[in-house]
Amino acid sequence: MDPVGIAAAPDAGPGPAWQSKCPWGAPNTTSISCSLADVMSEQLAKELQLEEENAAFPEVVAVAEGPFITGENIDTSSDLMLAQMLQMEFDREYDAQLRREEKKINGDSKVSISFENYRKVHPYDSDSSEDEVDWQDTRHDPYRADKPTTTPRKGFIGKGKDITTKHDEVVCGRKNTARMENFAPEFQVGDGIGMDLKLSNQVFNALKQHAYSEERRSARLHEKKEHSTAEKAVDPKTRLLLYKMVNAGMLETITGCISTGKESVVFHAYGGKSATEDKVIPPECAIKVFKTTLNEFKNRDKYIKDDYRFKDRFSKLNPRKIIRMWAEKEMHNLTRMQNAGIPCPQVVILKKHVLVMSFIGQDQVPAPKLKDVTLSSEDMKKAYYQILNMMQQLYKECNLVHADLSEYNMLWHDGKVWLIDVSQSVEPTHPHGLEFLFRDCKNVSQFFQKGGVSEALNERELFNAVSGLNITADNEVDFQAEIEALEKMNEDHVQNHGKKLSVFSSEGDPPIYDE
Ligand code: ADP
Ligand code: MN
């Protein structure tokens, strides 16, 4: 039973927007459009600002190591947590041992073998964030010893009275002992060879049987674990983080899963009490867990490699850190929006790849996405003007382009529109920032024009209204070309002068990022 009541994620509702129907019309993984490069550029540009925001937003809800203050089943939950921590510690030690053996065997040899498959703590659930993850995936079995010398077909070797048959007890026994080396490394076979142990066929076969079934069992367990990671993103590490939040009293209960997407899983939780006086935890929270599976990020790798700015610097960046950066980016973007007064979730706390924010909705029922509500024409019109306003605010006050704006990432709550899902949002001067904005504008225009809002600007007018730019092209192709030319101009300028142009700033005031 789950002590904190993380309800098993039901095969929750519709997936994220771009999964069920890609609003950009390009249903492939590249719709995770804006990439690591953004994260990186943001990251680079913002190191100082992050510090500042961090100071204003420290991880105040420190995890209490002391008494566990919530839940009826206090004992079980803390015991389980301790057990999990111990197990993790144990697994880590086991892996360290494996690594030592690996090193010993490989030495300076050019060809190396890896025990990767036998590791217990896999990169995505390990916490030693300092290690660089090694992408190599060797299926090489390190314990596959050289084939034991076989007895020739005829069934015996030697001559005359020195003849030994394949049934020779001593030879056979030694051979059996040596063959035990082929068992998986977690199967402790001891130093049979060293003590000249001779195993009878019967004993060997029994051991072999056992070793194989053990191996299969552990493979099954492992598979299960991996599966759950992919499905619900609650791998042991994440669980532990969630347990800690509940145990610290910050969250009252985690009730269940609201959404499962390709990159994140969102849970609903009831808020608890803050460790500090000045911070109030909202009564209902949404917990966005960024998935820690590596597969996605192997694909994203190219975004960094292709970006001249990050070639050297990020080629070896630890993927787990990258995932955390997405979460961090969402937090900072939400904070900026909050400061500008744009309706959006309020950040409660960020812990590694887990972002807790206020829940938009009530009594565990999330507010519907704009695509799922039927609004009166009056509300529709109101929503349109509100969004136009928010897009301008986002651009001018937050210096952001949403970059995944559509009826899938806007919620209707309390008679107004709320913006969510901003981990991919970028600054307008991002190498593709204006293209993203244009895409956002297309989505918004289309949605409202179809929705019968006659006042809705077309995408080009909307783009100009939001950016303050004055692109005059009257057709999409030319418009797009002008946008790309602007972006290129900016990039060239960055390459030559290491600084962003202020072409995107409508009123000619110095952009914030030029400081
Ligand atoms: P992604 O689309 O990348 O999976 P989102 O941030 O869009 O992630 O979240 C997925 C879904 O979870 C949203 O469509 C929304 O239904 C729900 N959701 C996310 N954040 C909140 C929140 N703060 N309050 C209520 N529901 C939320
Ligand atoms: Mn979304």
Image (cartoon, helix red, strand yellow):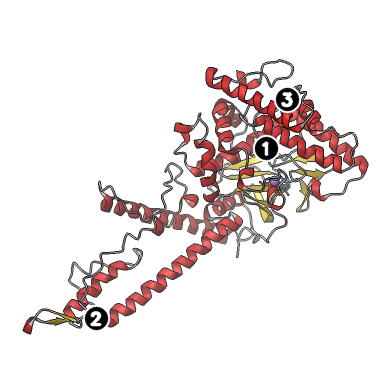
Which residue carries the number 3 mark? 396
Above or below, 74 against 356 in this view is below
Vertical arrangement, residue 347 with respect to residue 84, above or below: above
Q: Choose between 475 and 491: the one closer to the eye.
A: 475
Quarter that holds the N terminus: bottom right
Which of the marked residues, 1 or 3, is nearer the chain's N terminus? 1
Asked if residue 11 lies left or right of residue 447, the reply is left
Task: Using the rendered image of the protein, determine whether residue 110 is visible from the camera's viewpoint.
Answer: yes
Between the C-alphas of marks 2 and 1, the distance is: 70 Å
Q: Where is residue 243 in the image (x, y as percent from the top left)?
A: 58, 53
Disc 3 residue type (three-letter): Lys
Q: Quadrant of residue 187?
A: bottom left
In the displayed structure, 127 sits above or below 1; it is above
Mark 2 or mark 1: whose residue is earlier in sequence: 2
Compute the Cα span from label 1 to label 3: 29 Å
Q: Residue 200 carries which label?
A: 2
Residue 361 picture location, percent across and down: 78, 48
| Relative horizontal placement of residue 79, taking residue 512 as reference (left or right) | left
